[in-house]
Image (cartoon, rainbow, N blue to C red):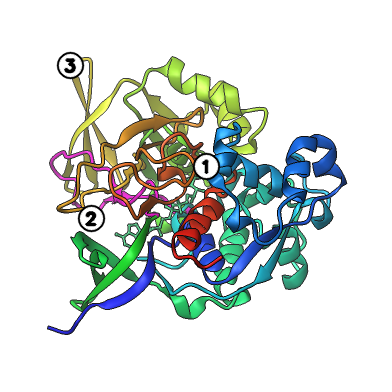
Amino acid sequence: MAAPEHHTVIIVGGGPAGLPLAVVLGGWHPYYRGGDLFSSRYEQVDRYLRSKNGTLLGLDFRAVTNAGIRPADLFRILHHPGQKFRGEGEIALDFRRRQPVDVLLITREEVGGVWNSVPENMLTLSPGQWMEFAFHPLDRHCREQRIDLDVNALIAKRHLIDYYHAVPRRFEVADRIRTHEEVTRILPHDAGFLLTSRVVGTDITRRYTCKYLVYAVGQRCILRQLNVPGENLPFVTSGYDQPGSYPGERILVVGGGRSADWAATELHDAGRQVHYVMRQPFDRHWRLISDSRWGLPYYARIAEIMESRSPRLHTRYETRVAGFEQGASAGLANLCRNGERETLEVDHALLEIGGIADYSLFDGFPPLRPVEKYDNYRFQVHQLPTHPHNYESAAVPGMYPGGYLAEGLGLVVIGMHGTTYAIAGDILQKEGRL
Ligand SMILES: Cc1cc2nc3c(=O)[nH]c(=O)nc-3n(C[C@H](O)[C@H](O)[C@H](O)COP(=O)(O)OP(=O)(O)OC[C@H]3O[C@@H](n4cnc5c(N)ncnc54)[C@H](O)[C@@H]3O)c2cc1C
């Protein structure tokens, strides 16, 4: 058998967590530039950073953490000194190209992660500029691509995914990225880690070794299933795209979180008869809608639909799906509420019940001990305990859970992007490359 292909660093997952690491390890280093807004808001930090020379990847992250600032927060305030974007000049960072590290990114879809598969017309929950990378402001991307967009507003998925897709070529790291390849197993190895992968849709397998591993696979490695009979019937699908993808009049949406709310609202407004089924009680669902309706347009819309008692949106709370069957002329969904059964005739059933981060690929390592994390937006994920100064796994030296897979981080891009620089800095410092 041929020797595995070796790289100093392998990143698994090319979403908003993994992709910027390929760029920064690929040579794009942050330097302190400062600025009026930053120095007026963060006087002490400004003084500290002015006393340092060279790339910020060389900071003593342990000392920064001991001084009470988490590295992710330090880079967040450098990148976003104010809530609103008012010009690149306010970003207190400047990026310069240095020698790259031998890094490879492997990801099973295109770069951009989950944004490749969220609904076509979906809006972000955060302002567009909160989803950007510090080295490439969304505003600059829009100017370069001649796109007219308000980066302080929520933006459509297609604009965001275009931005992520543009990054590898714009920063000349495309040759360090392998898309449509899925890592299937990770074992300990003398070199550090041994990875096996499979090229998606083929039987081609590959083996790699690396000294450092960034595991940035996100929260939807495995889509949740209901585990009920008939779930594999053709009229049942996981994940929603856009109304035109689902023929027929009567659509069952199973879920109750953000993605399911989006699907139910858009299908209703496309003229479909929507049956919306969820296990949670009405109060819990309505709280999410009420909390969100003033900030998010599609929540204002679902609130309006429900308050107007539209006959085309039929909600069923505290209800579970017991199974699916193929009827003579339509699909049948068997529902159960408080022990009472109901069978619905539907043309299509959509499951929008989220996913999980998959840690089962790790074999032969000490237990990773994931901990559960929820946020106010009802996102949830299992995070791994890490050292606070470098986001390295507490259980497996040399392994870095990417983005918000590290314990304690908020489940949004703006909350996790700063980990990029602490992880890259830690690796470069260990390698004696600074
Ligand atoms: C509907 C929806 C709306 C959201 N809205 C917002 C928002 O407005 N603002 C915000 O900040 N966040 C939002 N999020 C959170 C979202 O998770 C983040 O924006 C971001 O995508 C997380 O990045 P990530 O890189 O950690 O994970 P992901 O984006 O999930 O990327 C991980 C990548 O790794 C790949 N992968 C997984 N396993 C393997 C493997 N074994 N081998 C190779 N590749 C693998 C995946 O296929 C994926 O491409 C939203 C999420 C969803 C689902």
Mark 2 — residue? 234
Q: Which element type, helix, strand or loop, lies under badge 3? A: loop
Quadrant of the drawing holding the C terminus = bottom right
Q: Residues within 10 Å of mark 2 (few under 14, many from 20)?
A: few
Look at the image and tell me whether residue 16 can be seen.
Answer: no
Q: Nearer the viewer, residue 281 or 113?
A: 113
Tell me where the magenta segment starts and ends, as one range.
216-242
| Magenta-span inclusion, residue 227 | yes
Q: Mark 1 or 2 closer to N-term? A: 1
Residue 86's spot in the image, x, y percent?
A: 83, 49
Q: Residue at x 59, y 47 (%)?
A: 123
Q: Nearer the viewer, residue 211 or 124?
A: 211
Look at the image and tell me whether residue 34 can be seen.
Answer: yes
Q: Which element type, helix, strand or loop, lies under badge 1? A: helix
C-alpha span from label 1 to label 2:
53 Å
**Left-right relation of 370 to 408:** left
Extreme residue in the bottom direction: 2
Disc 1 and disc 3 in contact, CB within 8 angstroms: no
**Left-right relation of 54 to 181:** right
Q: Residue at x 73, y 43 (%)?
A: 48
Q: Mark 1 or 3 closer to N-term? A: 1
Q: Looking at the rendering, which quadrant does residue 203 occupy? A: bottom left
Of the residues shown, which amino acid type is indicated by label 3? Gly
Callout in the foreground (1, 3): 1
Residue 309's spot in the image, x, y percent?
A: 52, 23
Disc 1 and disc 2 in contact, CB within 8 angstroms: no
C-alpha span from label 1 to label 3:
56 Å
| Magenta-span inclusion, residue 251 | no
Mark 3 — residue? 339
Disc 3 and disc 2 in contact, CB within 8 angstroms: no
In the rendered structure, find residue 62 and report the number of the disc placed on it: 1
Of the residues shown, which amino acid type is indicated by label 1? Arg
